[in-house]
Image (cartoon, grey):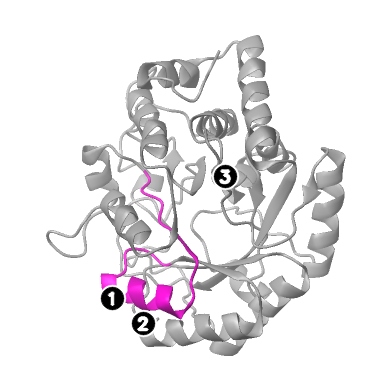
Amino acid sequence: MPGPEMSVCEIERWLREDDPQALATLWEVADELRRRYVGDEVHIRGLLEISNNCARSCAYCGLRAENVNLPRYRLTWKEILEGAATTAALGWGTIVMQAGEDYGITREWLAEVIAEIKRRTDLAVTLSMGERPLEDLRAWREAGADRYLLRFETSDPGLYARIHPPLREGEPNRLEQLEVLRELGYEAGGGVMIGIPGQSYASLARDIAIFRAMDMDMIGVGPFIPNPDTPAGCGELPPLPEGEQVPATDRMGYKVVALTRIVRPDANIPATTALATVNRREGRWLGLQRGANVIMPNVTPRRYREMYRLYPGKAIPEETADATADRLAKQLGEIGRTVAAGRGDRRRMLC
């Protein structure tokens, strides 16, 4: 029976498990821990993709600086405040502002935006802005930002170096930066890709153990989806031999969500857009029934959504925000869940 204190070897065994009855047990254990520690309410966060500019050259990401096929944009102050107002009006408790590592978004400018959102709404503000300098992170926290998402993608040093070249020599890795974020007072969130070429089962098992060891507040995981405008998407990163390479499937995504819930029972764990893209019919809903408790519908102005092209084929509903809210409430009810009220901060419990 999988449990919170599983060893790395036990986690790896569950990652390799294919027996339907054993997996049914895994889903059941994860769902029960989710119910016990974070309840049946689902926290809905409004996702606002404020810029697709990026200084980085990550091998897997469509926003990489070298991608000349991507039209670039950056939201205005007015557009950001409208996205926050929409999120608040729908009763969702958090606005998530996400971007590439865009230094056209200055420390002072974003600090003023955060402070204005805080003046106008009761929303929690989550940032996902990449590996910004300490002074930026401190200023944004002082302006009122509550949380920061920084997925480390893999804890394997060799694979990390291949997919994430540094901007400057000697910069800290993302695991070190997550510790800095916590010291600044943010709720800190990490996460990994599942099935990036070169990722082994043992490596992914260690990633899940790191979620536990670092006591992460938020954990986002999702399958790798190839982008032809990236080295990883056009075959420049060779996969491991069969039996060692983690597959980038929705079922492997559910396994990682479930195991993450088991080792970190009180964390906030989203059913990600990547899961919904790989399995459009039921990926998000199966994620919620196998350990997840957060979803992040897109409130980016519609004309920009296709340009935030991390990978092709991203699930992007064309409906209005009001229609999205109504649909989500209905679909959650169908699986016995409800929309949560309030900010959705982590409720720390004795695990």
> Residue 197 location in percent, x, y?
36, 36
Whether residue 320 can be seen here: no
Name the residue located 60 percent from the left edge and 89 percent from the top edge: 78
- Could you say which is closer to the camera, residue 141 or residue 318? 141
Residue range corresponding to the magenta coloring = 129-153
Which residue matches tag 1? 135
Which residue matches tag 2? 107
Is 157 on the left or on the right of 54, as rendered? left
Name the residue located 44 percent from the left edge and 83 percent from the top edge: 111
Which residue matches tag 3? 269
Between the C-alphas of marks 1 and 3, the distance is 28 Å
Whether residue 170 can be seen here: yes
> Residue 317 location in percent, x, y?
73, 60
Q: Which of the 4 quarters of the picture holds residue 142?
A: bottom left
Name the amino acid, label 3.
Ile
Between the C-alphas of marks 2 and 1, the distance is 8 Å
* Disc nearer the start of the sequence (1/3): 1
